[in-house]
Image: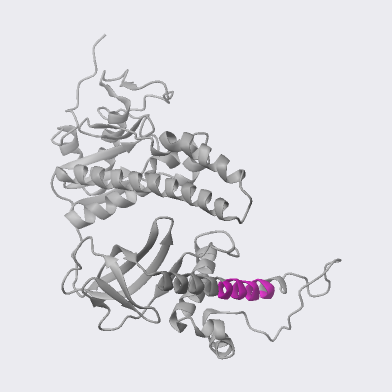
Amino acid sequence: MFNLTFEFKLKPTATQITVFEDWLEQCRKVYNYALRERKDWYNSRKCQINSCSIRSEYIITAEVPRPTYSSQCKALTAYRKTSPALQRVNAQVLQQTLRRLEKAFVSMWEQNHGFPRFKKQGALRSLSFPQLGATFHQGNRFKLPGIGSIKFCQSRPIPQGASVKQARVVRRSSGWYIMLTLQWDVSIPDIIPHGNPVGIDVGLTNLLATSNGLLIKRTRFFADAERKLKLLQKRVTRKKIGSNNWKKAQKKVALLHEYVGNCRKDWHRKLSHQICDDAGMVFVEDLNLVELKAGTLGKHCLDAGFGQFFNILEQTCFKRGVYFQKVEAKKTSQICPNCLNETGKKELSERTHSCHNCGYTTDRDVAAAQVVLKRGLAAVGHTVKMLAEGKFIGIPAKQESPRL
């Protein structure tokens, strides 16, 4: 199976927007109620068998099983018959809200994510439709269960032969969007290493440096908009909370954040295609992005968007048939790509790599990218002889040590 997600902007009417907002609010209440039920069950199991806390303790009998997705769906079905507000919402949309909560707990257990939190008003911004009718797409309209026919901006054609498996309606500051999950019943063969290899090193002075000497300066989308963002946020604080002017001021802040994110994503997509134009294999560092975010330069790392760039680059390589792989990122700036000897730790102000052993000199980021390239080629099975002869772009032939 081959899956892709297509995104389109919706043009709902005022009545449809009211329905969407009502559904989001009801889904938020269902999410919070289910979370409270699970949280109470866990809190009732915290105390010891022979003692309780001094202040208070949750008491739920031992026969009550742990709330799960299936049990909460059965309870929701029974309660929905007595609630007119929930009857207005599609039943499958409500079940997808419970499934979202289940995924949050699975992520907490398996990926060490935090405990799921309650969602305040307006925090839930998406609705999932897991099943769509046969006449879902009609010209420039989509037919959603319980909503009806809704217009959309067809920015690109929907591919023929693909079946729409799921639709997700998302509310953003710039409007309403729909994300369609398309599925093809085909088998995609794995991409094998081939063609011209390229190693990539990312940084803050240069967003990336390639092993063949290409240097791309880092764009500062958030830093350029920070002054205007500060002004808009100051206006929000001067408005009465909950008033119409406060909502308008908050929307301007959200629009600016969305604009910055869209500019960064567009830049990453264009850059990924530029890299794939002349490459058959792409190797990048396997960085610990959590540590980078929490460091001194965390704000600038988040502005650069290393994680988003790696994800977009991997997707672009998959679409264009380019082999993509992450390699070990340890000491890439401390190893000479020519003689593979350690040159010691460099200061951030030192931008030139100069090996005291073989005399090889180049830009610091380019040298790190060449080390990434050598590690990637070694990982895919290329021989040391081919590396030593420098048959790949960006790797010089091994030089003799200079005579004193």
Residue depicted at x 85% and y 66%: 55
Residue depicted at x 47% and y 37%: 228
Please state the extent of the stretch shown in magenta in the rendering.
29-41
Q: Is residue 1 visible?
A: no
Q: Is residue 159 left or right of residue 52?
A: left
Q: Is residue 250 left or right of residue 173?
A: right
Q: Nearer the viewer, residue 390 or 287?
A: 287
Residue depicted at x 69% and y 86%: 63
- Magenta region, main secondary structure: helix
Give the colour scheme shown: one colour
Q: Residue 14: within the magenta?
A: no
Q: Position of residue 249 (x, y in %)?
A: 52, 48
Q: Position of residue 147 (x, y in %)?
A: 39, 78
Residue depicted at x 33% and y 44%: 263
Q: Nearer the viewer, residue 223 or 342?
A: 223
Q: Is residue 219 visible?
A: yes
Q: Residue furthest right?
A: 54
Number of marks in picture: 0
Q: Give the quarter of the figure containing the N terminus.
A: bottom left
Q: Position of residue 46 (x, y in %)?
A: 73, 69
Q: Residue 39: within the magenta?
A: yes
Q: Residue furthest top?
A: 404
Q: Position of residue 214 (x, y in %)?
A: 22, 32
Q: Give the quarter of the figure containing the C terminus.
A: top left
Dividing the picture into quadrants, the one containing residue 34 is: bottom right
Q: Is residue 238 left or right of residue 125?
A: right
Q: Nearer the viewer, residue 103 or 98?
A: 98
